[in-house]
Every structure is written in structure tokens, then in C-alpha cells.
Amino acid sequence: MDAWVVAVDGPSGSGKSTVSRRLAAELHAGYLDTGAMYRAVTLAVLTAGADPTDAEAVVKIASEVTLDSGTDPENPHIRLNGEVVDGEIRGPDVTGAVSAVSAVPAVRALLVARQREIIAEADRIVVEGRDIGSVVAPDADLKVYLTASAATRAQRRSAEHDTDLQTTAAAMARRDALDSSRAADPLAQAPDAVVLDTTELGIDEVVSRLVELVRSSR
Ligand code: C5P
């Protein structure tokens, strides 16, 4: 197959990460987790003791850090200033602050440019995020929008992180509302995206449907 890009967007807990990694591995393609990039910048902001809602400070930090995103779906990792930070970026502090950081237009401009470079260098790649089909890769060969009921998404997240269901549901609703309502590149379903509701679908089923879609789109 020639070079191709698959864009996978959707809210948290929709199954995006698991599905995207599995899809990339099955198709021997690269995998890019753009959420990890916003999380790594947020970690840098918090480590510097800056206020995540102080756009000027956040942009300065974002423009000074070095990010290195691995694209191997079998071993995804992100380095912030040379250090692997995959564990730290999933903690509650970063999760609570990432929507403020990712709402800053200049931060998005920096990261979207970097994401496009990584995509251009890749032969075949599955890219997951919130604005991949709408902004980062509008010419993607296949656009997928994964969704699931709010209750299912909260249950998945709370099982994954071993956190209280009620608290997880509230934090998730807050983050989704912020990500969907921000002015710059909000969470959006591209008009030409294939929409899959994963509430009743198992991961295996979602992945095999997408493998078929990628093959038939070539
Ligand atoms: O996908 P994940 O939950 O790790 O994303 C973390 C946060 O990064 C999201 O809540 C959102 O604020 C931001 N994000 C974004 N655009 C993307 C990917 C993630 O704004 N393409």
C-alpha cells in the first residue's frame, strides 16, 4: 500500500487510544498520540510552577521545550526535554490542567506544526486526538470519529485508572465541555468522518471494522 494517514478523533474514554494503537500495529503503520504532546507541555508548565491559565507563560514554556514522540504502536512513548514522561503525564494534576493549556491558540499552532511534520515523515500513520480530521490532517485518507455514552466512557476511565466513578465522571464531563467549547480547534467531528459508537462494541470488533475500512479506502 502507498503512504496513508488515518485520523481518529473523539472524546476521552471513547476507546481512541487502544483502538488507534491496535489498528496501527495490525497494519504495520506508525502511531501518533497527539494528546500526549499537550499533556507533556502541561507537565512542563506545572513543573515550572507556572499558572496553566496564564497564556503568555504557557506559550513561552511550550516554545522552549523539546518534545520527542515515538511512533511505534508497540512501544509508544514521549520524551520531554529528553526524559520519558509517559507515567507522569497521565496523573490527575496534568489531566486537570491540560484543557487550559491546549486551549491556547499559540500552543496549538506549535504542536499542530510538529504533528504535521511527524505525519509528513511517516509512510503510514494512525493519528489520534481531537482535531486531527478537522485541522491537523484534513486530507487524511480515512477519518474516524469514535464515541460512546458518557456513562460507558466514565466507567472505562475509572476502571483503567482505578478511580472513583463519580469523581471520574465529573472530571471527564468538565474536560469534554472545555475541549468542545474552546475557540481554537475544538473537539470536532469532521463532516466526512466515519462515526463509530463503541458503547456496545468490543475493541476487537471496532479494530476489525477499521482494518476493513482502511483496506477498502486504498
Ligand atoms: O487524548 P488525551 O485525553 O490524552 O488528551 C488530553 C487533552 O489534550 C485533551 O483533553 C485536550 O485538551 C488536549 N488535546 C487537544 N487536541 C488534540 C489532542 C488532545 O486539544 N489533538
Image (cartoon, helix red, strand yellow):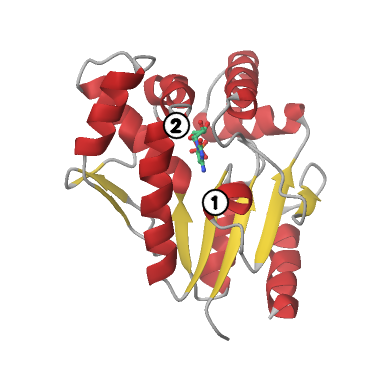
Q: In this view of the protein, which residue sits in the foreground, 56 or 66?
A: 56
Quadrant position of the N terminus in the picture: bottom right
The kind of secondary structure element at disc 1 is: strand
Q: Residue at x 42, y 20 (%)?
A: 97
Q: Residue at x 24, y 28 (%)?
A: 60
Labels 1 & 2 near each other (Cβ < 8 A): no
Question: Residue 106: x, y in percent?
Answer: 38, 33
The image quadrant of residue 141 is: bottom right
* Mark 1 residue CB less than 8 A from any atom of ligand 1: yes
Q: How many marks?
A: 2
Q: Amino acid at mark 1?
A: Glu
**In the rendered image, is residue 36 in sight?**
yes
Question: In this rendering, would 8 be left or right of 57?
Answer: right
Give the residue displayed 55% in from the left and 35% down from the top.
Answer: 160
Name the residue tied to disc 2.
Answer: 105
**On the image, which quarter does residue 193 sit in?**
bottom right
Q: Quadrant of residue 42?
A: top left
Residue type at numbered disc 2: Pro
Q: Position of residue 35 (x, y in %)?
A: 46, 41
- Nearer to the camera, 201 or 137: 137
Q: Where is 154 relative to 143, above or below?
A: above
Instruction: Determine which of the numbered discs, if any, sits on residue 128 in the image.
Output: 1
Residue drawn 45% across the image and 56% down it: 32
3D distance between C-alphas at marks 1 and 2: 19 Å
